[in-house]
Amino acid sequence: MDYQALYQQKLTTPEQAVKAVKSGDWVDYGWCTNHPVALDRALAARKDELTDVKVRGGVTMWMPEIAKAEDAGDHFTWNSWHCSGIDRKIIGKGMGFFAPMRYSELPRFYRENVTVDVAMIQVTPMDSHGNFSYALAASHLADMLDKAKTIIVEVNQNLPWVYGLTGCEINIADVDYVVEGDNPAVAQLGGGGEPTDVDRAVAKLIVEQIPNGACLQLGIGGMPNTVGSMIAQSDLKDLGVHTEMYVDGFVDMALAGKLTGRNKALDKGRQVYAFAAGTQKLYDYVDRNPAVMAAPVDYTNDVRVLAQLDNFISINNAIDMDLFGQVNAESAGLKHISGTGGQLDFVMGAYLSNGGKSFICLSSTVTGKDGTVKSRIVPTLTPGSIATDPRSCVQYIVTEHGMINLKGLSTWERAEAIISIADPQFREQLIQDAQKMGIWRRSNK
């Protein structure tokens, strides 16, 4: 097959390509760094011709053009699989909504539950075999594109080519239109600044629990990143990676020689992940690097896969938790913040692993805009808050005041343990709350 001839045959302008979108269509923008740029701009320019166009995305890194106009919601509805700050702003405009999910189920949603009329994503330039790489986001894209009636790819020369399992590339034969975009720099996700004393205290407690040869998953946020930095500076060795999101902390560990993956029962020697976002350092590291391997999220987050990886260590953040042990990692009351993502998958998968451990980390307090200090450990979750991790699944909880393991504890033991890692200024009130809730036993405080 003459791939270059086929490429030229399907090459068109963004303006021509987006004519495939009609009123009432479901349009998919893909995931994170793969969201289209030139195609998004061309679709926004058609705003006044279109109504009821429903667009899907997730972990949005920049404000899409289709969401910028004052009356954008009269024409487009944004649907996010996982919210970033940008997604929250779109929802705040009244034109966006969140779609709840366990991230591991997303490919199956596309196979069984959703419609895709038009899919448009950024990809790498085509190789000599006619393939485009999904670059930083294998995620669910293969199943999304299988479902799409029309596929438009926007080539960006700055995207890194990432090696991976089946489901990480698409061939020119399966594409309807090719657009050569403006080659924008890949959107970067910062590391959150210098770690705080609280971050360091929490990270130190977790790092002490990690054995040589462990397999790691890190969530996004300051504390998991601090754990990564501490591991890079530690004496730990022969660590592996099997994670949902690949972040800069893994690159630091790799460059420090900590990641060999030689003890992994699956994908030995490879750092496995569903999608990646970080700084240019990360993008340079993963580009055509055989040490890393992208994979669809129904592989990376499958608890049955995680259970096969010995000493699997999962480290994630939380917004708050209650005295029953329920963990909220996605909303502040009715205000939606992120999503379930893969947190519950990894909490369960780590516990099923031989020697595995799941850590949920959070600072004991948070300071509001008005300067008020509030406890992140609360009697019961705020009405409207989501129990991301049910109390029956949570294992280790870590704050700067200590680490507890909730497995095997009754309600009063849980309350006592959880209060022990709350900020001291809130402990007495939490004890009183626990007494009113009937989960406090007269015991040593």
Image (cartoon, rainbow, N blue to C red):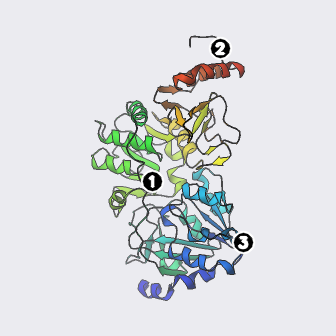
Question: Is 267 left, or right, of 260 in this rendering?
Answer: right
Q: Is residue 376 above or below residue 156?
A: above
Q: Position of residue 356 (x, y in %)?
A: 46, 35
Q: Quadrant of residue 91?
A: bottom right
Crowdedness near tag 2: few (<14), some (14–19) or many (≥20) residues, C-alpha within 10 Å:
some
Q: CA distance from mark 2 to mark 1?
A: 44 Å
User: Which quadrant would the C terminus be assigned to in this image?
Assistant: top right
Amino acid carrying mark 1 in the image: Tyr
Quarter of the image containing the N terminus? Answer: bottom left
Q: Which mark is residue 273?
A: 1
- Residue under pointer 3: 52
Left or right side of 61 for 247: left
- Left or right, 390 with respect to 51, comes to left
User: Please, what secondary structure does the residue beneath circle 1 have?
Assistant: strand
In the rendered image, residue 348, in percent from the top left (x then y), is placed at 56, 39
* Residue positioned most to the front: 370
Q: Position of residue 389 (x, y in %)?
A: 60, 39
Answer with mark 2 or mark 1, whichever residue precedes in sequence: 1
Q: For the residue labelled by badge 3, is the local secondary structure a helix, a strand or a loop? A: loop
